[in-house]
Image (tube, grey):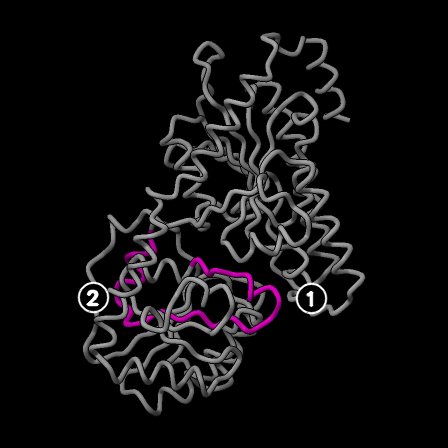
């Protein structure tokens, strides 16, 4: 990868995320947009294979750290993997700051505490951003099925502390933003950035098979996101809809369990399991699908989610079937999507059957759903770009014109290497 000389005065950004970079549409859109806006971007991420690599993708410098993303269900294993990533990110982030003079460090949660991997650059005046993809108190409560009020309050304090540590906070939708404000995160600190995939211009022609009716769900394979409910629904739909197929594309904690359920119910001909695909390959993978479905169960975490897969379906003109949850209802009217009651297999079956029986609805619904795109189109949503312009302007106005001395940077390096 190429690092520009100091004389070029690049606006350098380091992003950190515990994710598979190539398959994560949100982080890729933000990183690649920053590159298009004239920034030099480094991205710290877990390794995707056996060996950690450094490479460039669409102008972004990818730095893989020597840790694999945890895919099990052990709380201890989950914690250990995050802790190892945070420690490695601390050293890599500090090194990048010293060698490449990073100006802004943009941390994508989860977890929120990942922002403390940037503590050394923060002490030397680097600006920090926390991008809240998922609200930690709600997500942990849902993921580990914990009803502990003490734990929720503890995680809410952790969230507040992390938000206080950084200069700016990004929320992914307005309902989540309201939840953070209720927990005393200052509204003036928050930017609301609804990511909108830019692959619309590259979208594949719809390649529908008139002898099939294919429904797809892509992304994280998890029971809390209702994937098992779709398999149960597929068993009933195969008897009601000629040529019905359910396609599940992705990876996650419950992949093996979903595969076993499919095999146990003898649904191999109906339920098609596919591995995760790169973000920019989604249009081709989804081009043959008649409808897309979001199956999230109802819990305090999913009530705050605006599923990225739903935005993908709307972007690509695919009719969407969704659960009746707070954030989805905030943005989408019944004319824009088909609703079902979350967690109810019979309601899922009824919603899919309704869409199958109405070709006119399948034609008109994506047209209505485009109203969401018209309002929140990525080219119109300037909050991220404005936030970065403000961060760099603030940095320039507060600088004294003196860079940290080599002695000061040496001390920082010593601390980072201990």
Q: Residue 246: which quarter of the image?
A: bottom left
Q: Quadrant of residue 409?
A: top right
Q: Which residue is mark 2?
A: 207
Earlier in the chain: of badge 1 and badge 2, it is 1
Q: Image height check: is 309 above or below 17?
A: below
Judged from this view, the residue extending furthest toward the bottom is 239
In terms of depth relative to the viewer, which is nearer, 246 or 116?
116
Q: Position of residue 62 (x, y in %)?
A: 48, 35
Point out residue 167 in the picture as x, y percentages from the top left corner. Answer: 61, 33
Residue range in magenta is 281-308
- Per the rendering, the mark at residue 144 is 1
Percent from the top left, x then y, of residue 207? 20, 66
Front residue of 67/121: it is 121
Q: Left of 252 or right of it: where is 186?
A: right
Judge depth for marks 1 and 2 and give the one in front: 1
| Above or below for 132 versus 97 | below
């Amino acid at each position: 990868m190429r690092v520009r000389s100091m004389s070029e005065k690049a606006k350098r950004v380091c992003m950190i995320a515990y994710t598979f970079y190539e398959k994560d549409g949100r982080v890729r859109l933000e990183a690649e947009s920053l590159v298009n806006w004239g920034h030099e971007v480094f991205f710290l991420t877990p390794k995707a294979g056996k060996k950690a690599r450094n490479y460039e993708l669409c102008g972004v410098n990818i730095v893989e750290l020597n840790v694999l993303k945890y895919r099990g269900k052990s709380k201890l294993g989950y914690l250990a993997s995050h802790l190892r990533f945070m420690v490695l990110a601390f050293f890599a982030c500090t090194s990048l700051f010293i060698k490449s003079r990073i100006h802004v460090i943009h941390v994508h949660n989860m977890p929120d505490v990942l922002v403390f991997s940037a503590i050394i650059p923060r002490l030397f005046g680097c600006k920090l951003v926390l991008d809240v993809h998922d609200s930690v108190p709600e997500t942990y409560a849902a993921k580990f099925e914990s009803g502990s009020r003490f734990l929720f309050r503890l995680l809410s304090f952790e969230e507040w502390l992390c938000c206080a540590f950084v200069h700016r906070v990004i929320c992914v939708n307005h309902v989540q933003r309201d939840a953070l404000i209720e927990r005393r995160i200052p509204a003036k600190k928050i930017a609301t950035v609804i990511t909108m995939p830019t692959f619309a211009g590259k979208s594949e022609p719809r390649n529908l098979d008139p002898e099939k009716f294919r429904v797809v769900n892509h992304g994280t394979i998890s029971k809390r996101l209702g994937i098992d409910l779709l398999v149960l629904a597929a068993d009933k739909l195969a008897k009601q809809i000629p040529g019905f197929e359910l396609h599940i594309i992705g990876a996650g904690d419950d992949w093996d369990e979903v595969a076993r359920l499919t095999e146990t119910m003898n649904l191999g001909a109906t339920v098609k399991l596919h591995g995760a695909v790169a973000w920019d390959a989604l249009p081709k993978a989804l081009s043959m699908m008649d409808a897309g479905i979001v199956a999230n169960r109802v819990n305090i975490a999913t009530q705050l989610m605006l599923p990225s897969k739903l935005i993908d379906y709307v972007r690509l003109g695919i009719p969407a079937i969704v659960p009746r949850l707070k954030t989805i209802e905030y943005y989408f009217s019944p004319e824009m999507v088909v609703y079902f009651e979350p967690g109810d297999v019979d309601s899922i079956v009824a919603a899919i059957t309704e869409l199958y029986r109405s070709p006119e609805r399948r034609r008109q619904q994506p047209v209505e759903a485009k109203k969401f795109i018209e309002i929140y189109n990525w080219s119109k949503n300037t909050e991220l770009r404005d936030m970065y312009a403000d961060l760099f302007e603030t940095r320039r106005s507060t600088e004294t014109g003196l860079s940290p001395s080599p002695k000061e940077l040496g001390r920082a390096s010593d601390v980072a290497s201990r």
